[in-house]
Amino acid sequence: MQGKNRGTATRFTNETRLFFEDDGSTLWITFIGEKLCWGFLTANPPERHADGDGVRRRIDGGWRWKDVNGESLAKDRLSGALTKLAAYRGTSCDVDVEEYVIHRINGLKSPEVERAVAARLEMIASVLGLMKLLLPRDFELLVDLVFTTSGWRRLGVVGKTQKTIDLAIMLPSTGERAFVQVKSHTTSSELSEYVGQLEGTLFDRMFYVFHSGEAKTDDERVIVMGPERIAELVLDAGLVNWLIDKVS
């Protein structure tokens, strides 16, 4: 430890001891790219690394980057109190938010978060009910507002652009052009008729939006947006008050 102070020497020694003496009961975490990864060491002793300069120990089952419920542990969904550790320049360090880490890996959320999630789900359910009270013309207008508040620019008048197009839109940042077909109630058979008309147009893709019924397609150029998805977008776009006023 030439040139190192006593505190640094102690830290290096403890890091080495933890690596060699762990019996598999220590939870190890690291950040790989934009994801939090976690795992436990196997009981196998250290083995020489392929580069010949050191040794390594294996993570039992490999690194995991999802919680026990299968939800991704992406950095943008984690507290800054934890993600700040990604900037640590040493080999390993203690985690000062260990309870938070364990809760996130176990898919547990704080009571405050649980209440907020429950309230959001209740609001989405309410939006679903309100949308079905809209007249077709008002539902088209709601869809128009959802897209324009999401960054799309309207190119044509709602419901009057063409017979098969309720809304022609463009994304200014990329120049992508798309058209939106809006239906209050629909079926997969009806959707397939519109998909067939996509050929020969100047549009890059099609959005098929409805609030009742069911519609599916395998065409990658078509994005089907059913009632649950539209309800989420209405909430995210801050259009709930507009919707309430329309059906009041």
Image: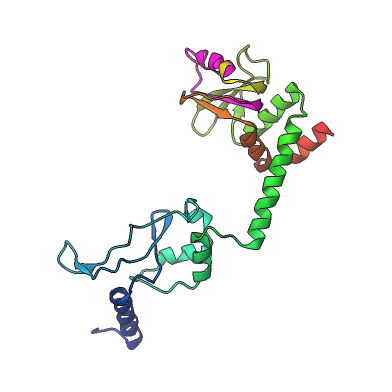
Residue 185, position as x, y percentages in the image: 67, 22
On the picture, is 57 further left or further right than 228? left
**In the displayed image of the protein, which residue is found farthest to the bottom?**
6
Q: Is residue 238 visible?
A: no
Picture layout, residue 23 above or below residue 171: below
**In the displayed image of the protein, which residue is found farthest to the left?**
52
Q: Is residue 89 visible?
A: yes
Residue 28, position as x, y percentages in the image: 39, 67
Q: Quadrant of the C terminus?
A: top right
Residue 194, position as x, y percentages in the image: 56, 15
Residue 203 belongs to the span the image colors magenta: yes
Q: Quadrant of the N terminus?
A: bottom left
Picture layout, residue 128 above or below residue 96: above
93 vs 175, nearest the viewer: 93
Residue 128, position as x, y percentages in the image: 71, 35
Identified at 36% across, 69% down, the residue is 89
Q: Which residues are magenta?
A: 190-214
Identified at 53% across, 16% down, the residue is 192
78 vs 41, nearest the viewer: 41
- Specify the color scheme: rainbow
Q: How many marks?
A: 0
**In the displayed image of the protein, which residue is found farthest to the right?**
248
On the picture, is 6 further left or further right than 164? left
Residue 43 belongs to the span the image colors magenta: no
Picture layout, residue 91 above or below residue 246: below
